[in-house]
Image (tube, rainbow, N blue to C red):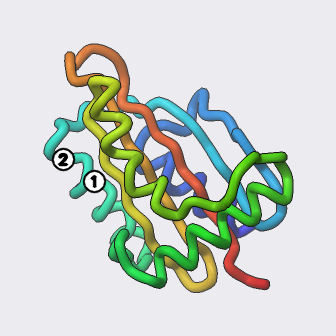
Amino acid sequence: MKTRNIAGQIMGQLEAFEGSKAAMDTTPLLIVRGKSRKKIQPEELGPTISKIMKNLGAKELDMFSDETADIITIMDEQIRSQVDIQGETDIYGIYRLKESFENMNCHADYGMGLLDDIAIFIVLWKDKSGIGPLFVELVVSSMET
């Protein structure tokens, strides 16, 4: 239940709660997708993620740290326990995420945080044309084993 509470707080801060949908909802892991009503400029995507982490009291993690790589591996295992995914875990795929969005003509940013035993991964992206909403993808995962 703690993961749902944290996800609700984040989606609320982003004004993305209404119409959001859970892409995966298990005991240890919740993935939520939504559209934010906020008008956030591309250069404010990263600072917005940092502000959300700060408001939650979460420790913002360096995306290229060993700690983050370990968390991504745990999240991947949690997802693979529910969905059949071909291939090996590729923790570096997450680092290519921003580049993938940019290749699709989108501004994007992401961040990882840790609040006690809960890992938080937020991705924000929007079309470079400025038309359309700000999309949110959120992964909230219990690190308890």
Q: Position of residue 5 (x, y in %)?
A: 65, 61
Q: Which mark is residue 44?
A: 2
145 with respect to 30 (left or right) = right
Mark 2 nearby-residue class (10 Å; few <14, some 14–19, many ≥20):
few
Viewer-proximal residue among 42 and 6: 42
Q: Secondary structure at mark 2?
A: helix
Of the 4 image quadrants, the one containing the N terminus is bottom right
State if disc 2 and disc 1 touch (CB < 8 Å): yes
Q: Which mark is residue 112?
A: none
Residue picked out by circle 1 = 48
Of the 4 image quadrants, the one containing the C terminus is bottom right
Query: What is the spatial separation of the Cα atoms under label 1 and label 2, in whole angstroms?
Result: 6 Å
Mark 1 nearby-residue class (10 Å; few <14, some 14–19, many ≥20):
some
Q: Measuring 28% from the left and 34% from the top, which residue is drawn there?
A: 102
Viewer-proximal residue among 64 and 141: 64
As shown in the figure, which amino acid type bears the numbered disc 2?
A: Glu
Q: Position of residue 34 (x, y in %)?
A: 53, 34
How many numbered marks does the figure carry? 2
As shown in the figure, which amino acid type bears the numbered disc 1?
A: Thr
Viewer-proximal residue among 9 and 62: 62
46 with respect to 143 (left or right) = left
- The quadrant holding residue 63 is bottom left
Q: Measuring 63% from the left and 83% from the top, which residue is drawn there?
A: 117
Q: Measuring 22% from the left and 57% from the top, which residue is drawn there?
A: 47
- The quadrant holding residue 36 is top left
Q: Position of residue 111 (x, y in %)?
A: 38, 61
Q: Is residue 104 above or below residue 131?
A: below
Q: Measuring 46% from the left and 55% from the top, which residue is drawn there?
A: 94
105 with respect to 61 (left or right) = left
Q: Secondary structure at mark 1?
A: helix
Q: Is residue 69 above or below residue 77?
A: below
Viewer-proximal residue among 116 and 61: 61
